[in-house]
Image (cartoon, grey):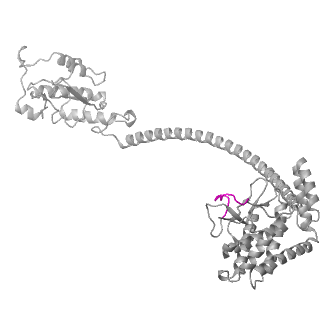
Amino acid sequence: MTTPKPDIQAAATPASPTSLTPENQEFFKAPNFDNQAPKDAPAPSPTAETTSKLEIKPEPKAGGNPAPVIATATAPVAATPPVATATTTATTTSNGQEASIAQQTAAVTVAPAAEAAVTAAIASAIFQANDVEMPLAPGTPNGEELKLLVNESIIDDSDPEDISDDEPIENGTESEETRQARYARDRIEELEMRNNILAANLDDALIERQRIESDFARSVGLSQDLHRQLVDTQQKLQKRERDYEVMSKNYLEHVRLIRATDDDHSTIIDRLTQLKASIEHLVRKAQGSRSVNLNKDVVIEHFKESGLLEGFPIPADKLEAFHLNLYMESVIMSTLVTRFFNKALSCIFSFNEGFKDIYDWMHSRNEKLAVRWRQQLCVMITQDPATKARQEEEVTEAAAALSELVSKVYTNANELAKLKDLCNKAFELSVAMTALESVISPETVVLGTAFDEDNMGTSLKSNPEGKVALVIFPSFVDKERAFNIRPKVWCY
């Protein structure tokens, strides 16, 4: 790196009232040194005294090359501020690549009045650094005068208005007012930018608010429409509920007109099961413990006379007590079937035969009308005031006949009350089964039929692989076979 030498000719030609005289200019152009070195002689190197006097500091250089000597201002000129200074430092890496870091500071403006003094000072310092005495031009100020002129020029020209915000003041530091002004300007720009952003966000928010208000208004309208529809629907629903109540009432009244009782298949099944259990309990109680009350000879004779033992696979002298008890259950149930369940309409109806002929004729032509007519007749029977009396007569007559038989078979047996209860149950069941849309009636099992476990129920000491020898309790079915009560049989 070489030390730049000032262009004395350029620096010595200021356009100022205090410029050098023509004589001085001529002097600087062609100096007349007494001891002028030969033209081809090399420039003398600065001595140690000159280096110390001028405060010459070697500048380190990458690569190990000797640093050139940089001359600094002498003591008389050191107090003056730097004039038009600009330095650039360049370094070279070990790989041969160059990276430059430029540090530039703006020059302080020097008044024209001080230019001559500064130029003279620079020239003097150069010649002193080279140990050469150079005579000054006439009228050139000395060191003290130069220092005074430079300071006055700096003070006069340091008007804050002429200094820009980017110019360094006082050794490269910014003044407080400049910093504050720059900070205020930057802050204003930042606030303006934020203000613009907030304004844009406000516009977007206003647009969104208008959209939301529009949606809200539309939602309110839809809500009002839905509310009106809800009110209309509730009114229609209330009207339909009132209509349904009327229809339900009319239906119940209509059903009551054609149904004698409120029974259905489930209640019929329960009542028939209870009837069968009541017959079993009555016989078990009448026979006593181990059939002690059973009159075996009387029973066998009675059964022979009535023909019940005809076709029975066991001879009369081989019959056991449980055989005779099962025979008594069969006789009681057969009596109930004959007197109550096998009637076309009811046991108390005097025109059962004529009713059956008319019903069959109607059923062959219009089944619905025939069924309705039968149901209406059953309702009339149950609502007839004379029905109770007729029912009492039939029940008493049937119970008396059964009580006489039971008293002969079982000694000291008095089961008239229970037999009357059985007959009442049979009468009510017969009316209920006849009043249904599909009549439920008893159906017997043919003797000698093989036992069917799925469709038959066994009794005491019955052979599950044998054939039916005695029907104790018949089956009850309707026409469609939707209702079916299994029979109770004894197989041999």
The residue at the point 30 percent across, 35 percent down is 154
Q: Is residue 62 above or below residue 274?
A: above
Q: Is residue 261 visible?
A: no
Q: Residue furthest bottom?
A: 412
Near-viewer residue (339 or 426): 339
Name the residue located 21 percent from the left edge and 21 percent from the top edge: 7
Magenta range: 446-457
Q: Measured along the vertical axis of the image, is residue 492 above or below residue 154?
A: below
User: Residue 332's spot in the image, x, y percent?
Assistant: 77, 72
Q: Is residue 464 left or right of residue 325?
A: left
Residue 117: quadrant of the picture: top left
Q: Is residue 134 above or below residue 266?
A: above
Q: In which image quadrant can residue 27 be found?
A: top left
- Specify whether 271 is left or right of 314: right
Query: As rendered, which of 334 and 347 lies closer to the eye?
Result: 334
Q: Is residue 455 magenta?
A: yes
Res 292 → quadrant: bottom right
Q: Position of residue 383 (x, y in %)?
A: 91, 68
Asked whether residue 477 is drawn in magenta, I would say no
Residue 155 image position (x, y, % from top left): 31, 37
